[in-house]
Image (spheres, rainbow, N blue to C red):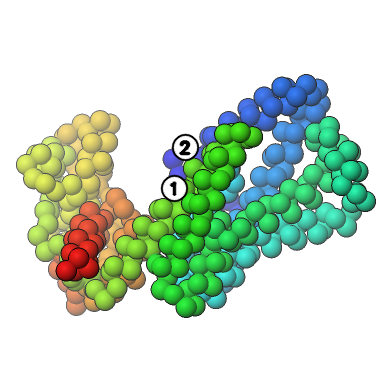
Amino acid sequence: MKGALKIGKIAGIGLFIHWTFLILIAFIIYINYKAGHTLSQILWSIFFILIIFVTVMLHELGHALAAKNYNIQTIDITLLPIGGLARLEKLPEKPSEELVVAFAGPLVNLAIAFITALFILLPASSEELISQLSNGVNGSNFFLNFFLVNLWLALFNLIPAFPMDGGRVLRAILSYKLQRHIATKIAARIGQFLALGFIFLGVFYNPFLILIGIFVMMAAQIETNYTDSKYMLKGYKVRDIVMHQFLTIESEETLGKAIKLLLDSQSRDFLITKHGHAVGTLNRDEIIAALSQKGENILLDSIMNRDLIYLNADSLLEEAFETIYKNKSSLLLVMENQELIGTLDTENLLEFILIKEVKSKKADGD
């Protein structure tokens, strides 16, 4: 994710923190200052937020380790001001698997809350609870706050609204009876309805809720579009959308040749060959970056992308969708009987989906 700083790695999973996390720290300092808290109380609050984000990381690791049981790897985990984001290489589509992966995160928070409860004395009444929490986070109520936040994180994430874990649980349950894209749409719409509630409350009570509401609205729509697109590819194979006409450039040519082809055609992606064999790819962004840094006399062999990605022409398009979607900026090579028969990129895939959508709407109208 852009704007994220790598802070380490656990179980082979990269851990990142987004720069906007600093905004949250600044916000915590501001509200504590406005409340008239001392420097000691402000420092306790900052320390508490940092510890909470460690538990958020553990929450996301719970999802990651559960997914690993189904041979689904986690690309990375990024900590944001509104929580954590674990990027899986693909989402589990079997309802039973999605249930396990979705529940894993909240269960981590519940386990942490349970362990914490063993070492603290819980308030006997709501009045005592309010009294202990009234002066903000400090040394005497730190673990009580820690217990309550973990409990809240578990319950909040189990709200049956996408994209929270509870929304994924709801989608998995609905998927036992409904097609996945329909189940996703129902969970997403519930999530967006609740997001409007967050935004409304945020205007009057806490601006942070507005940020959560906007995130939920956007994430729910992205997932809906993703599953709708994937559903429209059912029944098709990679060969149905392969581009048989594509531009190639020899690896010993200079960047200047690639620039001329870029300006003289509609192509944005080029296949780099050596003696007629594919050895790399080069796209428009890579061409512009190389021109800026190295000049147009540089050989393509030294700037091309050597990580070639292959697709079998007879692969189901819905199964290849994950690979295509994950490699948005790459030109993918389509093979048949170990021979190159064409290429594929996300632009061509999106055009195919757009045409399918128009035909579907026209058929429904007729």
The quadrant holding residue 314 is bottom left
Task: Please report the residue visible at 69 percent of the width from the left and 60 percent of the height from the top.
Answer: 108
Task: Report the side of 37 relative to 319 (left or right).
Answer: right
Q: Nearer the viewer, residue 314 or 145?
A: 145
Q: Nearer the viewer, residue 187 or 77?
A: 187
Task: Report the side of 45 relative to 13 (left or right).
Answer: right
Compared to residue 295, the image places residue 154 above or below, namely below
**Residue 242 shows in this picture:** yes
Local secondary structure at mark 2: loop
Task: Please report the residue visible at 71 percent of the width from the left and 51 percent of the height from the top.
Answer: 152
Task: Please report the residue visible at 53 percent of the width from the left and 63 percent of the height from the top.
Answer: 168
Q: Nearer the viewer, residue 264 or 24?
A: 24
The quadrant holding residue 347 is bottom left
Name the spot of residue 24 as percent of width and height, x first.
Answer: 61, 33
Compared to residue 112, the image places residue 8 above or below, namely above
Task: Please report the residue visible at 19 percent of the width from the left and 42 percent of the height from the top.
Answer: 299
The quadrant holding residue 134 is top right
Circle 1: is it few (<14), some (14-19), or many (20+) Cα within 10 Å? some
Circle 1 is placed at which residue position? 218
**Residue type at numbered disc 2:** Gly
**Residue 14 shows in this picture:** no
Q: Which mark is residue 3?
A: 2
